[in-house]
């Protein structure tokens, strides 16, 4: 059992979390009778995918992907931070920004920003979907007087009062 | 100007929808000119782009000038695979806009600007899906077009329509989410979202291409797209959503949305994963072809069981999706099946448009929603019936129409790939379509036999049926129908150059396929 946890669960912990959330959402989507509960399932489903992407961008011991004039290691590690010598002003012909050595950046020190940016878009899409879904379920409620799927289906099977 | 065509195609309808939302609400008369102006601008750009692509080869467009390896650019790519579909999307939108001028006003006067806002957004989303060269942007555009189509389906005040739209929304969102998940795995493995970059990495890097992550990505992406295109076991949302929506929405969504999803599948197969990888490494093509056979047969048989005209057409769409998926997966060495699929996307858009427009006119103006109510329709509405017949003959596959040629290429692919079950299913389905439509022709030509009718029909009631339900200028809806019928025949007559162009594109995009799967 501990073998299983050490070799299968722990290295892929983020995958396990997202798959379990995904299945919870899918189950609610399929098995729940109430339309609003289905929508909650849909939200869980989408959020699981967002978590998957976000976890994909994270690295251990890394910082936010913003280039400072110092190297990122200096930015997070106070022990390396050594103040400039008293006399050592930046010489005027070398602006601060030019000190950033863009060639020798170690990408392992930065979290990958791209999945997070993508998920901002996906969150917006999810919110829009939820908004449309709530509007439609409101319409369903006005027309059927209920949000329970089995009652709606019963009403639709019933005498054809539908124009 | 000419270098900006790809952006104009997507942005013109989108700006149009904003303008309609702004000004259309003040005065509904603003709607129609804005719609036509933006669609015409988009169509002109699409035609110009087609000319560029055919004369000078593929066009790559980077929005804002951000070149691709940075990973944040929006890459639009037009090549021989998609320019024809772009033109087809805008032409279908123009025809439907034409036919909706009067009808949407009669259906829901209050919501005319809302309808046109969604209409143009859908058009923009679909052309964006078609032209984008980036896997994640494709997801966003798929959701743009899906959200608008949920709205369009729900717009009918009918009760079944809103519930169907709800189910459509659930299924559609699950499909798009699966697609997103697949793209996530692909990104983890390749580190890029650009289709061309992914293709290069998969072609060069054996380790990545053989990895399990890419296989899982492919499965997720395919299942997601299959839900979106209503491939048979996943088709549950389609018939109700298309049947109970307003007829203008149905004649816009029916011809375009599923077809564009098929195009996405082909695009993913050809220019992201690569045919070699799919048919040699992945190698599930036999299973998919069998699924397609099941889709074709069950779609046709379910269509035969329907009494409502529009529902019957919806099940025919399910069968047609089976044609296209099967054609793409037959894996014949010369890619005739894939050519047939690409051509059938265009042909099916024209046929479905024609039939949906005719069904809409039958329902709205002549009050005939069921097959039985088409009694002596040829005498009552000859022009509309001509359009309907042409659409029906194309569905059956009668030679001068495009339906014949697409079936010809698909069958050629099936034979070359050795998938005889697919060939037999295609022929059987044509046969069932013939039964289906000739049953309608009989009722519409000769009238219903008294013995066949329902009990309460007397032998002589055709006289009261002669009154049109909705009185208004007929030509706004007749013209697009006849234009769609003409485009069916033109597409059939000029299939040579289009198919040649597809074949050139397929040769250029993919290395020659390996041995066909046994």
Image (cartoon, coloured by chain):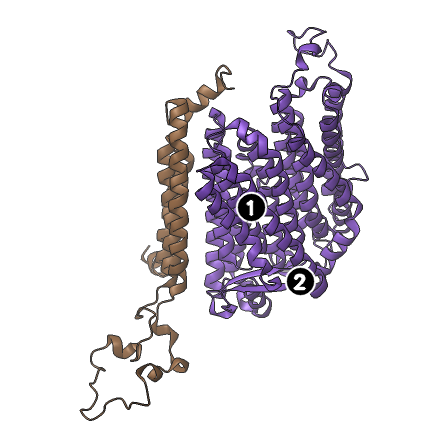
Residue B492 circle label: none
State which mark lies toward you, 1 or 2.
Answer: 1
Residue, disc 2: B509
Q: In the figure, what tint was chain A given?
A: brown
Question: Residue A77: horizontal and vertical position, in percent?
Answer: 23, 77
Task: Pick the residue in front: B356 or B194.
Answer: B356
Quick one: SS at disc 1? helix
Question: Residue B159: horizontal and vertical position, in percent?
Answer: 47, 24
N-terminal label among 1 and 2: 1
Q: Is residue B411 left or right of residue B82?
A: right
Which quadrant of the figure has residue B378? top right
Furthest toward the bottom, the residue is A87
Residue B15 appears in the picture as rendered: yes
Q: Is residue A98 left or right of residue B495?
A: left
Task: Pick the residue in front: A148 or B290.
Answer: A148
Which quadrant of the figure has residue B355? top right
Q: Residue at x 51, y 69 (%)?
A: B67
Q: Residue at x 68, y 61 (%)?
A: B53
Give the answer, above or below, for where B319 lies relative to B220.
above
Residue B273 appears in the picture as rendered: no
Q: Residue at x 49, y 54 (%)?
A: B182
Residue, disc 1: B123
Q: Chain drawn purple, letter?
A: B
Question: What's the distance in space between the residues labelled 1 and 2, CA to CA?
Answer: 27 Å
Task: Pick the residue in front: A82 or B52.
Answer: B52
Numbered-mark total: 2
């Amino acid at each position: 059992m501990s073998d299983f946890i050490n070799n299968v669960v722990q290295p892929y912990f983020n995958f396990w979390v997202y798959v379990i959330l995904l299945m919870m959402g899918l189950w609610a989507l399929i098995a729940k009778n109430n339309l609003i509960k289905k929508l909650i399932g849909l939200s869980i489903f989408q959020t699981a995918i967002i978590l998957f992407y976000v976890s994909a961008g994270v690295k251990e011991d890394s910082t936010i992907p913003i280039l400072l004039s110092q190297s990122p290691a200096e930015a997070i590690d106070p022990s390396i931070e050594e103040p400039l010598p008293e006399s050592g002003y930046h010489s005027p012909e070398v602006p601060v920004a030019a000190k950033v050595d863009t060639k020798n950046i170690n990408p392992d020190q930065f979290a990958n920003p791209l999945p997070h940016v993508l998920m901002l878009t996906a969150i917006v899409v999810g919110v829009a979907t939820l908004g449309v879904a709530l509007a439609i379920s409101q319409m369903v409620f006005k027309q059927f007087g209920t949000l329970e799927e089995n009652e709606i289906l019963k009403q639709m099977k019933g005498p054809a009062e539908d124009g | 100007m000419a270098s900006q065509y790809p952006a104009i195609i997507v942005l013109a309808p989108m700006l149009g929808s904003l303008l309609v939302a702004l000004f259309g609400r003040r005065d509904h008369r603003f709607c129609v000119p804005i719609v036509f102006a933006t669609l015409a601008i988009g169509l002109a750009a699409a035609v110009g782009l087609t000319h560029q692509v055919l004369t000078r080869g593929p066009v790559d467009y980077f929005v804002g000038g951000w070149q691709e390896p940075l990973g944040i650019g929006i890459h639009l790519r037009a090549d021989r695979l998609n320019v024809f579909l772009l033109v087809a999307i805008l032409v279908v939108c123009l025809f439907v806009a034409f036919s909706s001028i009067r009808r949407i006003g009669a259906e829901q006067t209050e919501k005319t600007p809302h309808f046109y806002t969604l209409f143009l957004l859908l058009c923009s989303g679909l052309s964006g899906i078609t032209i984008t060269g980036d896997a994640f942007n494709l997801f966003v555009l798929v959701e743009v077009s899906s959200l608008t189509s949920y709205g369009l389906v729900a717009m009918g005040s009918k009760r079944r329509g809103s519930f169907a739209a709800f189910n459509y929304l659930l299924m559609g969102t699950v499909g798009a989410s699966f697609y997103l998940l697949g793209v996530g795995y692909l990104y983890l493995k390749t580190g890029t979202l650009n289709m061309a970059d992914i293709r290069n990495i998969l072609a060069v890097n054996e380790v990545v291409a053989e990895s399990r992550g890419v296989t899982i990505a492919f499965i997720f992406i395919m299942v997601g797209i299959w839900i979106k295109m209503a491939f048979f076991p996943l088709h549950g949302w389609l018939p109700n959503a298309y049947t109970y929506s307003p007829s203008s929405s149905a004649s816009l969504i029916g011809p375009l949305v599923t077809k564009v999803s098929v195009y996405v599948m082909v695009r993913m197969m050809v220019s992201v994963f690569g045919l070699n990888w799919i048919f040699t490494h992945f190698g599930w093509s036999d299973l998919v072809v069998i699924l397609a056979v099941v889709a074709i047969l069950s779609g046709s048989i379910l269509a035969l069981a329907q009494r409502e005209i529009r529902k019957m057409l919806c099940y025919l769409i399910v069968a047609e999706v089976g044609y296209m998926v099967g054609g793409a997966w037959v894996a014949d060495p010369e890619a005739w099946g894939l050519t047939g699929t690409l051509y059938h996307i265009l042909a099916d858009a024209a046929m479905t448009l024609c039939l949906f427009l005719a069904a809409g006119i039958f329902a709205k103006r002549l009050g005939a929603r069921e097959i039985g109510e088409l009694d002596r329709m040829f005498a009552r509405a000859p022009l509309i019936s001509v359009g309907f017949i042409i659409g029906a003959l194309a569905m059956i596959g009668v030679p001068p129409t495009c339906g014949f040629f697409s079936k010809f290429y698909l069958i050629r692919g099936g034979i070359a790939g050795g998938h005889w079950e697919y060939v037999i299913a295609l022929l059987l389905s044509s046969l069932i379509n013939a039964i289906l439509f000739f049953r309608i022709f009989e009722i519409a030509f000769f009238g219903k036999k008294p013995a066949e009718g329902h009990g309460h029909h007397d032998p002589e009631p055709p006289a009261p049926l002669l009154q049109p339900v909705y009185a208004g200028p007929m030509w706004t809806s007749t013209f697009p129908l006849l234009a769609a019928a003409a485009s069916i025949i033109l597409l059939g007559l000029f299939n040579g150059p289009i198919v040649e162009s597809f074949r050139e594109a397929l040769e250029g995009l993919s290395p020659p396929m390996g041995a066909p799967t046994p």
